[in-house]
Image (spheres, rainbow, N blue to C red):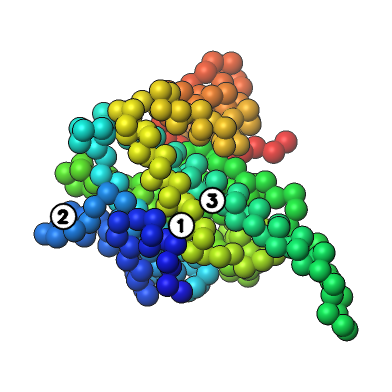
Amino acid sequence: MDWSRSRAAVPRFEFLAHAGSTNDVLRDAATGSEAADWPHGAIVVTDDQTAGRGRLGRTWFAPSGKTLAISLLVRPAGAGGRMLPPDALGWIPLIAGAAMTEAARRAVAAATEAGAAVEEAPAPAGTTSGDDGPGGVEVELKWPNDVLVSGYKLCGILTELAPGGDAIIVGAGLNLTLDEHDLPAITATSLLLATGREPDADAVLADYLSGFLAAYATFAEAGGDAERSGTADWVRGLCGTLDADVRVELPGGGELVGTAEAIDGDGRLVVREHETGEPQAVSAGDVTHLRY
Protein backbone atom coordinates (compact mmCIF):
# COMPACT_ATOMS: atom_id res chain seq x y z
CA MET A 1 0.00 0.00 0.00
CA ASP A 2 1.37 3.43 -0.90
CA TRP A 3 -0.81 5.33 1.62
CA SER A 4 -1.34 8.10 -0.94
CA ARG A 5 -4.33 9.71 0.78
CA SER A 6 -2.72 9.67 4.20
CA ARG A 7 0.54 11.07 2.84
CA ALA A 8 -1.40 13.94 1.28
CA ALA A 9 -3.07 14.76 4.60
CA VAL A 10 0.10 15.51 6.61
CA PRO A 11 3.41 17.37 6.14
CA ARG A 12 5.51 14.29 6.91
CA PHE A 13 4.48 10.63 6.76
CA GLU A 14 6.71 7.77 7.89
CA PHE A 15 5.53 4.18 7.60
CA LEU A 16 7.65 1.66 9.49
CA ALA A 17 7.60 -2.05 8.67
CA HIS A 18 8.11 -2.73 12.39
CA ALA A 19 8.31 -0.62 15.55
CA GLY A 20 8.53 -1.17 19.26
CA SER A 21 6.43 1.90 20.08
CA THR A 22 5.58 4.52 17.45
CA ASN A 23 5.10 7.05 20.27
CA ASP A 24 8.70 6.47 21.34
CA VAL A 25 9.99 6.72 17.77
CA LEU A 26 8.19 9.99 17.14
CA ARG A 27 9.07 11.52 20.51
CA ASP A 28 12.76 10.83 19.98
CA ALA A 29 12.65 12.24 16.45
CA ALA A 30 10.64 15.34 17.40
CA THR A 31 12.93 16.27 20.29
CA GLY A 32 16.30 15.17 18.88
CA SER A 33 18.93 16.89 16.80
CA GLU A 34 16.72 16.84 13.68
CA ALA A 35 13.57 18.10 15.42
CA ALA A 36 13.19 20.90 12.87
CA ASP A 37 12.50 18.24 10.22
CA TRP A 38 9.45 17.09 12.16
CA PRO A 39 6.71 19.74 11.87
CA HIS A 40 3.31 19.91 13.47
CA GLY A 41 1.16 17.18 11.92
CA ALA A 42 3.99 14.74 11.14
CA ILE A 43 3.16 11.09 11.79
CA VAL A 44 4.79 7.71 12.31
CA VAL A 45 2.66 4.64 11.61
CA THR A 46 3.10 0.89 11.50
CA ASP A 47 0.95 -2.21 11.24
CA ASP A 48 3.43 -4.22 13.33
CA GLN A 49 4.01 -2.68 16.76
CA THR A 50 5.68 -4.99 19.25
CA ALA A 51 5.82 -2.89 22.44
CA GLY A 52 2.66 -0.83 22.42
CA ARG A 53 1.34 0.66 25.62
CA GLY A 54 -1.87 2.21 26.78
CA ARG A 55 -3.12 4.29 29.66
CA LEU A 56 -2.09 3.43 33.23
CA GLY A 57 1.03 1.66 31.93
CA ARG A 58 -0.89 -1.17 30.28
CA THR A 59 0.86 -3.07 27.49
CA TRP A 60 -0.77 -4.64 24.48
CA PHE A 61 0.17 -6.74 21.49
CA ALA A 62 -1.61 -7.35 18.20
CA PRO A 63 -0.88 -9.67 15.28
CA SER A 64 1.12 -8.10 12.47
CA GLY A 65 -0.88 -6.48 9.70
CA LYS A 66 -4.21 -6.34 11.52
CA THR A 67 -4.00 -3.07 13.45
CA LEU A 68 -2.54 0.38 12.94
CA ALA A 69 -0.34 2.11 15.51
CA ILE A 70 -0.49 5.80 14.68
CA SER A 71 1.55 8.54 16.36
CA LEU A 72 0.79 12.14 15.44
CA LEU A 73 2.95 15.13 16.39
CA VAL A 74 1.29 18.23 17.80
CA ARG A 75 3.25 21.42 18.27
CA PRO A 76 0.90 23.13 20.75
CA ALA A 77 1.19 26.71 19.54
CA GLY A 78 -1.92 28.77 19.05
CA ALA A 79 -2.58 31.69 16.74
CA GLY A 80 0.52 33.78 16.10
CA GLY A 81 2.80 31.04 17.38
CA ARG A 82 1.82 31.56 21.02
CA MET A 83 1.76 28.45 23.20
CA LEU A 84 -1.66 27.30 24.25
CA PRO A 85 -2.44 27.67 27.96
CA PRO A 86 -1.67 24.50 29.94
CA ASP A 87 -5.35 23.96 30.81
CA ALA A 88 -6.20 23.74 27.11
CA LEU A 89 -3.94 20.75 26.51
CA GLY A 90 -6.45 18.42 28.15
CA TRP A 91 -8.67 18.86 25.11
CA ILE A 92 -6.12 17.32 22.73
CA PRO A 93 -6.96 13.67 23.53
CA LEU A 94 -10.65 14.54 23.30
CA ILE A 95 -10.10 16.08 19.86
CA ALA A 96 -8.23 12.96 18.78
CA GLY A 97 -10.97 10.70 20.08
CA ALA A 98 -13.67 12.72 18.36
CA ALA A 99 -11.77 12.76 15.05
CA MET A 100 -11.30 8.98 15.20
CA THR A 101 -14.97 8.49 16.08
CA GLU A 102 -16.02 10.39 12.97
CA ALA A 103 -13.52 8.49 10.80
CA ALA A 104 -14.81 5.17 12.15
CA ARG A 105 -18.41 6.22 11.54
CA ARG A 106 -17.62 6.97 7.93
CA ALA A 107 -15.78 3.65 7.55
CA VAL A 108 -18.81 1.81 8.89
CA ALA A 109 -21.11 3.78 6.58
CA ALA A 110 -18.89 2.92 3.59
CA ALA A 111 -19.03 -0.78 4.49
CA THR A 112 -22.81 -0.57 4.85
CA GLU A 113 -23.15 1.01 1.42
CA ALA A 114 -20.85 -1.60 -0.10
CA GLY A 115 -22.90 -4.38 1.47
CA ALA A 116 -26.14 -2.87 0.17
CA ALA A 117 -24.68 -2.68 -3.34
CA VAL A 118 -23.72 -6.35 -3.21
CA GLU A 119 -27.18 -7.34 -2.02
CA GLU A 120 -28.83 -5.41 -4.84
CA ALA A 121 -26.64 -6.94 -7.53
CA PRO A 122 -27.66 -10.27 -9.11
CA ALA A 123 -25.85 -13.18 -7.49
CA PRO A 124 -23.45 -15.12 -9.74
CA ALA A 125 -24.80 -18.44 -10.99
CA GLY A 126 -24.43 -21.22 -8.46
CA THR A 127 -24.01 -18.93 -5.42
CA THR A 128 -26.23 -17.62 -2.64
CA SER A 129 -25.94 -14.45 -0.60
CA GLY A 130 -25.35 -14.94 3.12
CA ASP A 131 -24.16 -11.41 3.95
CA ASP A 132 -26.76 -9.34 5.74
CA GLY A 133 -24.51 -6.27 5.89
CA PRO A 134 -23.35 -4.39 8.99
CA GLY A 135 -26.49 -2.39 9.71
CA GLY A 136 -27.29 -1.24 13.23
CA VAL A 137 -23.69 -0.45 14.23
CA GLU A 138 -23.29 2.44 16.67
CA VAL A 139 -19.96 4.29 16.89
CA GLU A 140 -19.34 6.68 19.78
CA LEU A 141 -16.63 8.31 21.85
CA LYS A 142 -16.10 7.08 25.40
CA TRP A 143 -14.62 9.84 27.54
CA PRO A 144 -11.87 10.75 27.29
CA ASN A 145 -10.43 9.02 24.24
CA ASP A 146 -11.66 5.52 23.45
CA VAL A 147 -13.77 4.79 20.39
CA LEU A 148 -16.50 2.18 20.87
CA VAL A 149 -18.47 0.27 18.28
CA SER A 150 -21.73 -1.05 19.72
CA GLY A 151 -20.10 -0.87 23.14
CA TYR A 152 -16.86 -2.66 22.15
CA LYS A 153 -13.48 -0.94 21.99
CA LEU A 154 -12.23 -0.22 18.48
CA CYS A 155 -9.51 2.30 19.24
CA GLY A 156 -7.63 3.64 22.22
CA ILE A 157 -5.60 6.85 22.34
CA LEU A 158 -2.60 7.69 24.50
CA THR A 159 -1.38 11.29 24.56
CA GLU A 160 2.08 12.08 25.95
CA LEU A 161 3.86 15.38 26.54
CA ALA A 162 7.44 15.29 25.29
CA PRO A 163 10.32 16.66 27.40
CA GLY A 164 10.45 20.44 27.10
CA GLY A 165 6.71 20.75 26.59
CA ASP A 166 6.88 21.93 22.98
CA ALA A 167 5.73 18.61 21.47
CA ILE A 168 2.77 16.36 22.19
CA ILE A 169 2.59 12.84 20.83
CA VAL A 170 -0.92 11.58 20.13
CA GLY A 171 -0.81 7.80 19.82
CA ALA A 172 -3.75 5.77 18.55
CA GLY A 173 -4.18 2.03 18.23
CA LEU A 174 -6.86 1.17 15.67
CA ASN A 175 -8.18 -2.38 15.21
CA LEU A 176 -8.64 -3.00 11.51
CA THR A 177 -8.95 -6.70 10.69
CA LEU A 178 -8.65 -8.58 13.99
CA ASP A 179 -10.94 -11.60 14.08
CA GLU A 180 -12.49 -13.12 17.18
CA HIS A 181 -9.36 -15.22 17.82
CA ASP A 182 -7.06 -12.15 17.76
CA LEU A 183 -8.90 -9.89 20.17
CA PRO A 184 -6.87 -8.79 23.22
CA ALA A 185 -10.01 -8.72 25.41
CA ILE A 186 -13.65 -9.72 25.21
CA THR A 187 -14.52 -6.01 25.27
CA ALA A 188 -12.64 -5.30 22.01
CA THR A 189 -13.66 -5.37 18.36
CA SER A 190 -12.35 -4.40 14.92
CA LEU A 191 -13.76 -2.75 11.82
CA LEU A 192 -13.82 -6.16 10.13
CA LEU A 193 -15.83 -7.73 12.95
CA ALA A 194 -18.15 -4.72 13.21
CA THR A 195 -18.98 -4.57 9.51
CA GLY A 196 -18.14 -7.95 8.01
CA ARG A 197 -15.91 -6.21 5.46
CA GLU A 198 -12.21 -5.43 5.30
CA PRO A 199 -11.73 -1.66 5.68
CA ASP A 200 -9.72 0.62 3.43
CA ALA A 201 -6.93 1.38 5.88
CA ASP A 202 -5.59 4.35 3.92
CA ALA A 203 -9.04 5.94 3.73
CA VAL A 204 -9.68 5.53 7.47
CA LEU A 205 -6.25 6.86 8.42
CA ALA A 206 -6.45 9.83 6.06
CA ASP A 207 -9.91 10.66 7.38
CA TYR A 208 -8.68 10.63 10.98
CA LEU A 209 -5.58 12.72 10.23
CA SER A 210 -7.37 15.38 8.22
CA GLY A 211 -10.20 15.52 10.76
CA PHE A 212 -7.85 15.92 13.70
CA LEU A 213 -5.68 18.58 12.07
CA ALA A 214 -8.68 20.64 10.93
CA ALA A 215 -10.31 20.48 14.37
CA TYR A 216 -7.07 21.26 16.15
CA ALA A 217 -6.44 24.27 13.89
CA THR A 218 -9.84 25.71 14.79
CA PHE A 219 -9.17 25.07 18.48
CA ALA A 220 -5.72 26.68 18.32
CA GLU A 221 -6.99 29.71 16.41
CA ALA A 222 -9.36 30.32 19.32
CA GLY A 223 -6.42 30.24 21.73
CA GLY A 224 -7.42 26.86 23.12
CA ASP A 225 -10.90 28.04 24.11
CA ALA A 226 -12.99 24.90 23.64
CA GLU A 227 -16.32 26.67 24.02
CA ARG A 228 -15.60 29.58 21.67
CA SER A 229 -14.07 27.33 19.01
CA GLY A 230 -17.03 24.93 19.03
CA THR A 231 -14.73 22.08 20.06
CA ALA A 232 -16.61 21.38 23.28
CA ASP A 233 -20.00 21.06 21.58
CA TRP A 234 -18.50 18.86 18.85
CA VAL A 235 -16.98 16.46 21.38
CA ARG A 236 -20.12 16.40 23.52
CA GLY A 237 -22.21 15.51 20.49
CA LEU A 238 -20.07 12.43 19.81
CA CYS A 239 -19.63 11.28 23.41
CA GLY A 240 -21.70 8.25 24.41
CA THR A 241 -20.54 8.58 28.01
CA LEU A 242 -22.86 11.51 28.63
CA ASP A 243 -26.09 10.50 30.39
CA ALA A 244 -24.66 7.02 31.06
CA ASP A 245 -24.19 5.43 34.46
CA VAL A 246 -20.45 5.00 34.92
CA ARG A 247 -17.77 3.74 37.25
CA VAL A 248 -14.60 5.83 37.22
CA GLU A 249 -11.41 4.30 38.59
CA LEU A 250 -9.52 7.34 39.84
CA PRO A 251 -5.75 7.86 39.60
CA GLY A 252 -4.10 6.79 42.82
CA GLY A 253 -6.97 4.49 43.81
CA GLY A 254 -10.60 4.87 44.67
CA GLU A 255 -13.61 4.95 42.42
CA LEU A 256 -16.62 7.07 41.64
CA VAL A 257 -19.98 5.61 40.64
CA GLY A 258 -22.65 7.87 39.25
CA THR A 259 -24.24 9.39 36.18
CA ALA A 260 -22.07 11.28 33.68
CA GLU A 261 -23.89 14.57 33.29
CA ALA A 262 -21.55 16.85 31.34
CA ILE A 263 -18.14 17.64 29.91
CA ASP A 264 -17.14 20.99 31.35
CA GLY A 265 -15.18 23.79 29.71
CA ASP A 266 -11.87 22.23 30.77
CA GLY A 267 -12.73 18.86 29.23
CA ARG A 268 -13.44 17.23 32.59
CA LEU A 269 -16.21 14.67 32.99
CA VAL A 270 -18.82 15.79 35.51
CA VAL A 271 -20.28 12.79 37.33
CA ARG A 272 -23.17 13.04 39.79
CA GLU A 273 -22.34 10.48 42.45
CA HIS A 274 -25.14 8.02 43.14
CA GLU A 275 -24.43 7.73 46.86
CA THR A 276 -24.22 11.43 47.72
CA GLY A 277 -26.03 13.08 44.82
CA GLU A 278 -23.15 15.53 44.50
CA PRO A 279 -21.47 16.36 41.16
CA GLN A 280 -17.73 15.75 40.85
CA ALA A 281 -15.48 16.86 37.98
CA VAL A 282 -12.98 14.21 36.90
CA SER A 283 -9.92 15.19 34.86
CA ALA A 284 -8.49 11.67 34.51
CA GLY A 285 -9.67 8.16 35.17
CA ASP A 286 -10.60 4.80 33.71
CA VAL A 287 -14.30 4.88 32.80
CA THR A 288 -16.62 1.89 32.52
CA HIS A 289 -20.12 2.28 31.12
CA LEU A 290 -22.39 0.36 33.48
CA ARG A 291 -25.13 -1.88 32.09
CA TYR A 292 -27.86 -2.74 34.56
Q: How many tags in the picture?
A: 3
> What whole-number distance in Å separates the C-alpha atoms at marks 1 and 2?
24 Å
Residue 47 visible, this angle: yes
The residue that appears at 57% across and 32% down in the rendered structure is 237
What element does badge 3 sit on? helix
Q: Residue furthest bottom?
A: 126
Q: Amino acid at mark 2?
A: Ala
Quadrant of res 190:
bottom right
> What whole-number distance in Å separates the C-alpha atoms at marks 2 and 3?
30 Å
- The residue that disc 2 covers is 36
The residue that appears at 88% across and 84% down in the rendered structure is 126
Of the image marks 2 and 3, the number of the one nearer the N terminus: 2
> In x, y percent, where is residue 18?
36, 73
Q: Is residue 219 left or right of residue 261?
A: left
Of the image marks 3 and 1, the number of the one nearer the N terminus: 3
Dot 3: within a 10 Å radius of its alpha carbon, few (fewer than 14), some, or many (20 or more) residues?
many
Dot 2: within a 10 Å radius of its alpha carbon, few (fewer than 14), some, or many (20 or more) residues?
few
Q: Which mark is residue 206?
A: 1
> In x, y percent, where is residue 50?
39, 69
Quarter of the image that includes the C terminus = top right
- Residue 59 or residue 40, whichever sits in front: 40
The residue that appears at 20% across and 36% down in the rendered structure is 81
- The residue that disc 3 covers is 103
Q: Amino acid at mark 1?
A: Ala
Q: Is residue 157 left or right of residue 14?
A: right
What element does badge 1 sit on? helix
Residues tagged 2 and 3 counted as in contact (Cβ below 8 A) = no
